[in-house]
Image (cartoon, rainbow, N blue to C red):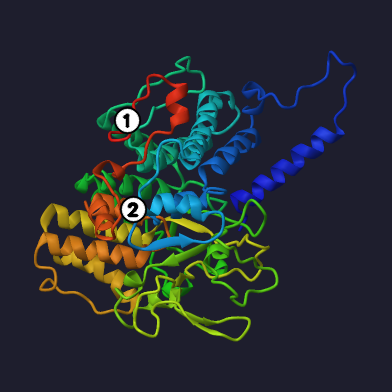
Amino acid sequence: MITIKKYRLIAVAVMACGYLLSGCESFLEEAVYTEYDPAKLLQTEEGINSVLVSAYGELQFKGNNREFNHTFAEFPTDIALESGGGFEREAVLFMNFQWDESHAFFSNSWSKMYRAIRNANSLLDNIGLATSLPEQRLAELTAEARFIRAAAYFHLYDLFGPVPLITTSETLDMEPVRPSEADFSAFLTAELRAAADALPAVQDMIGKATKGAALAVLCKFYLNTKQWQLSADAADELIGLGQYGLFGAIEELFTVDNETNAEFIYTHPYLPLSGFGNTYMAHAFPPNYPVLPNWENYGAQYRTYTSFVKSFEPGDRRLRMFLTEYTTIQGQQVQLVEDEQGRPLDNARSFKYVPDPSAINAFHGNDCPIIRYADILLSKAEALNELNGPTDDALALLNDIRERAGVSLLTLDNVPTPADFRDAVLRERGWEFFSEGLRRQDLVRHGQFIGSAIARGKAAKPHHVRYPIPRRELEANQQLTQNEGYD
């Protein structure tokens, strides 16, 4: 199946050929190829798709996977750490809660998401020009743009809280203010609802917005803002589509051969090409690991805390995704969990993204799921517990995940109170979604992000549950207000 990335490469090549072959009659009449003219480009579905592909390219974590999924989402938590290479000087700031508003990662992520929003707005402002398209098809393309815009705002909210809502490319407001939590939530949920109502259940390309993807983001936004009933309702609607299910062998879910499985709902696709690949494994290979000749092993090392590895039940199939020992290319046996005296080494490696045999240097083709079906089941279980306490229905959802992992099933006697069930869900989410960029938001939602960090000796403060608005944005917009604690 073709992916967004492949389509984008083809589009760029075609455009480049067109530029090279075009000529001009005189200097004054020379065509300007770098100027975007929506009145001409957006009259056809081909033109609309070219803008959509550009918007998807900004929305996806290509080039920012290291920041979104790991630096922001796991290094400040109880799962992962980093050492070595030039990247260590950046990672250590997040491991030790020493970041500030001047860090380039914040401004880069802000700009990337707002570029996706800009491209989606441009399409939404002008899509009515495509008068020759059937009404239903026009509605689907419009819904894709609304999904992209909403998904970008979802990512921004996860990092910074409510951010300025720019809903048109024709705005004259150069200094938009931050909306209230209520206004931001109302806009985002309305956009996702509208997108879900119009999007098809299945698309022709991996990575494009679907009805399930819109419902999944809606479910997770409701969950993270503790709108429990609405989260459970969105989960039910998604489950009712009948499009998704748990993949049988969890340890094989993230291989390149299994990318088109029914568990991945909302995915960012990758290709084994420079600039388009998943670079996770280049950071996960330990020193002198016997890599293939076409793989690359970075000096920057993603590691896993021993306490997290040892928290799994023995026999948990998800433990198979960790490298706990290996033989170097020199024949030396290396332990990664504990030394001979039983002291933690904090050096196990997550091999969840099983190395791609066809990788080119650091760039592997493993797609990155943003939301998968297991997440929806656990989200619904969590929401039901917050609404009604432990019930058979909530427990069955939790046990679906545990059964797939090959661990003991829980009974209501194991989780007799809402607090017990809440803790069980949080533990399960850690075991299920490590290396997927969800740990920070889960700990924040459960009120354990700061306490967990303090217990590890970090200088975490209550305001660290949100990252700071980038300094560059504050300097450019005098109406922007900084998040509490960063002034």
Side (left or right) of 60 relative to 329? left
Residue 487: assigned label: 1
Residue 372 in the image: above or below residue 233:
below
Q: Position of residue 414 (x, y in %)?
A: 13, 73
Specify few, some or many for label 2: CA neighbours under 10 Å numbering under 14, 14-19, or 20 or more: many
> Residue 383 sits in which quadrant?
bottom left
User: Residue 289 location in percent, x, y?
Assistant: 58, 76
Label 2: state its secondary structure. helix
Which residue has dot 2 on it?
A: 440
Residue 236 visible in the current orientation? no
393 versus 28 height, above or below = below
Q: Residue at 56% of width from left, 85% of height from top?
A: 332
Label 1, residues with CA under 10 Å away: few <14, some 14-19, many ≥20: few
SS class, disc 1: loop
Question: First in sequence: mark 2 or mark 1?
Answer: 2
- Residue 318 position within the rendered picture, expressed as x and y whole percent measured from the top left: 39, 74
Mark 2 and mark 1: Cα distance apart in space: 23 Å
